[in-house]
Amino acid sequence: MEPAAESGTFQSLPAMFFARAARWADRPRYRVHRDDAWTEVDWRTMEQSVREIAAGLVSLGIERGDRIAIFAATSPEWVEIDLAIQAAGGVTIPIYHSNLASEAGFILLDSESRMVWVDGDKTVTKVREALASGVELEGGVAPLRLDRILVLHGEAVGAEDTLGVAELRRRGRDDRAAQEEVQRRVAALRRDHLATIVYTSGTTGAPKGVVQTQGNHLAMIENTAALGVVREGEVDFFFLPLAHSFARMIAYYGLYVGSVTAFARSIDTLSQDIAATKPNVIPAVPRIYEKIHARIHATRDAGSALTQKIFDWALEVGKQRSTYQQAGESVPLWIQVQNVVARKLVFERVQHLLGGNVRVMISGASPIAREILEFFHAFELLILEGYGLTETTPALTINRADDYKFGTVGKPIPGCQITIAPDGEIFARGPNVALGYYKRPHETAEAWDDNGWFHTGDIGEFDSEGFLRITDRKKDLIKTSGGKYVAPQKIENLLKTQPHISQAIVIGNNRKYCTALISLDEDSARSFRERHGIGPGERLDRNPEVLQLVEAEVADVNRKLASFETIKFFRVLPAELSEAAGELTPSLKIKRKVVEARYGDLIEEMYG
């Protein structure tokens, strides 16, 4: 279709994909679990699927610039459909699979989507509900209309407005004119053309559609590819929701460099799928690393006294080695010798939990505690933290395997300009920064100034070596009634490094002192029940021994804080916060207002 191009000369993501598919036709593109076995799919097969879906969309009457939504869970088909929409000249509108009918309806209406892809009965039902009830807006209820509901897997049965992917692909194969039109549309795409509108998951308020161009995405993958985060032929493990910009970046990056993407079956099967696919690179959000950290500690606690002693010794050896490596200094011989023994006794077992072949892990979407990074590094597992927003498509900085510093989010990605405003806010501009918010000129003018700088809303600073450190969200800073400013994320991250604490929400705005809502880690709680013979019917959040354990862990954190930052009181929640309960966003960030409203009685107890 399109001739292969060198870095920096592609005009669109579809053109890049087709060039790569021609170059690596017979090589594996992704691994997926089907019919009770892992199967590899090559580039040629994926390319055929993208071509047929794109032609099928054109045969349905899709015009250049038309919006088509994808309301589905992460899968290889999601990526194929995304590329096909753009190859047909359309604009992809991703919707989180977990979104409610009202949330999906708002995005479909606001984006003016003509069609929506769904992946099962649940998402079909949500779309039907939104179509039937309309979308609630400030001025009343607005009707929602769609030309088609397209089914991502298999055949569609039932309603006339529903079409399955198999039938759509058949139409694409049979329609020669549509195939030729796809070629023309791909050739006509340019970097300044719209690729997608990504709606922020939103911890507060209605989501905003971020307008991202072909050039935004191409600049991001071109400028990061030279850093070698993922290498040609490596296996990268994929489970993140593709409605999130971090996941989309990883997906496009894999296409650009020629990796083999292993798609997890679900978030519930991560441990089994990682062990089976043995990835070299694992991108994840901090919550996943926190869960693995807690699981390792729970396994340690469940072992014998001797096992615990060996684990603690190996961890201490690993920390000593890590300290020298972080400083760029040679590791003393006596530590090297002990590290070899520690690797055989403990490290390899921990690494086996992640498949045994991991070269590097990537953390994005929200801050991760330095203590978590150092813990994994002690076991010879390197996590590289990056930073960015949906509006920056999505990265601005990243730590690199040969140039990293824990506690920072790394150095600016080539092509990204970053400056710190007088009040500490981070400003950014560059070819990866999005155009603005869809149909929201006022909010766009607030976030993008006349000189093209995007105001991130994050507070940060550069150190003497050029590494960026994020201190907090500008809007999330707590100001106590005594006039002291407190960065809650710093305290929350410290709390989450404790063995029995899973999640933490620091309270204190306009209050005399800081308090915290805390949830127990499930694995640690299960281990505690087994060790103390506590049945599932007894609530651990009221157990005196559990409260004593958490109190000691809170005290340990308080010793690292200034007096005005310390947690004076805490309450343990009855269960972990969850996305299903509406307490977390799809990228597993805490919805503070929801949690504070739901547990308002516990908060008032701490200030009573």
Image (cartoon, grey):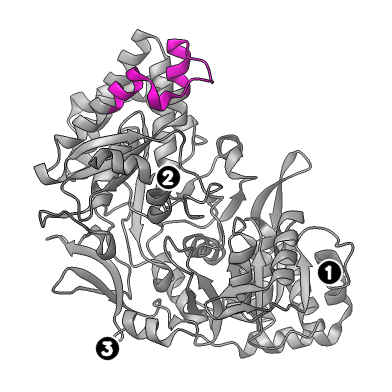
Q: Residue at x 39, y 39 (%)?
A: 290
Q: Which residue corresponds to mark 2?
A: 287
Q: Tell me the crowding category of disc 2: few under 14, some 14 to 19, or many 20 or more residues within 10 angstroms, Cα based.
A: many
Question: Judging from the image, what secondary structure is the residue with disc 3 in?
Answer: loop
Q: Is residue 292 left or right of residue 52?
A: left
Q: Which mark is residue 566?
A: none
Question: Judging from the image, what secondary structure is the residue with disc 2 in?
Answer: helix
Q: Amino acid at mark 3?
A: Asn
Q: Quadrant of the N terminus?
A: bottom right
Q: Residue at x 14, y 60 (%)?
A: 463
Q: Which residue corresponds to mark 1?
A: 163
Q: Tell me the crowding category of disc 1: few under 14, some 14 to 19, or many 20 or more residues within 10 angstroms, Cα based.
A: many
Name the main secondary structure of what is drawn in magenta. Answer: helix
x%, y% of residue 48?
Answer: 76, 68
State which tag comes first along the sequence, 1 or 3.
1
Q: Residue at x 42, y 60 (%)?
A: 203
Specify start and end residues of the magenta stretch as a single range. 526-550
Q: Which residue corresponds to mark 3?
A: 451
Q: Give the CA separation, mark 1 to mark 2.
A: 37 Å
x%, y% of residue 275?
Answer: 57, 35
